[in-house]
Image (spheres, rainbow, N blue to C red):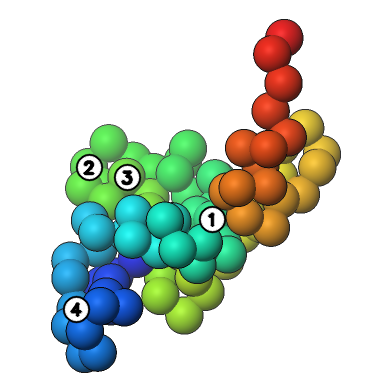
Amino acid sequence: YFETVEGSDEAGIRYPGHFSWLYVLNDQVRGVQERANILNAPPSDRSFGFQPDNRNYGGKANATVDGKQYDNLFVWMNDQRRR
């Protein structure tokens, strides 16, 4: 989740954080949101515990699933198996 997204097609062009799929597409996401902040967010929190973070490429946490840490989304996707 990013505050703003800077496009690579034209220097200096900024898009709203919703366009963070551009960073996913270009494999530029390195961090994830803190799971505890999201799970413990009160119902009145309109951000649902998410904290936009451009400096840390999407979040300060590392993506960890079943004890394995992933550096990016594509590595995680490659590791998926049919159960």
SS for callout 1: loop
SS for callout 2: loop
Which badge, 1 or 3, comes first in the chain's sequence?
1
Left or right of residue 4: residue 27:
right
Residue 71 % position (x, y) = 69, 58
Which badge, 4 or 2, comes first in the chain's sequence?
4
Amino acid carrying label 3: it is: Phe
Q: Residues within 10 Å of mark 3 (few under 14, many from 20)?
A: some
**How much space separates mark 1 and mark 3, taking CA atoms?**
15 Å
Which badge, 1 or 4, comes first in the chain's sequence?
4
SS for callout 4: strand
Residue underneath mark 4: 14
Amino acid carrying label 2: it is: Ser
Task: Pick the residue in front: 58 or 5.
Answer: 5
Residue underneath mark 3: 48
Q: Residues within 10 Å of mark 1 (few under 14, many from 20)?
A: many
SS for callout 3: loop
**Image position of 68 with respect to 12: above or below:** above
Q: Nearer the viewer, mark 2 or mark 1?
A: 1
Residue underneath mark 1: 32
The answer to whether any part of residue 42 appears in the image is yes
* CB contact under 8 Å: marks 3 and 2: no
**How much space separates mark 3 and mark 4, taking CA atoms?**
24 Å
User: What residue is shown at x 69% (from left), y 28% (from top)?
Assistant: 80
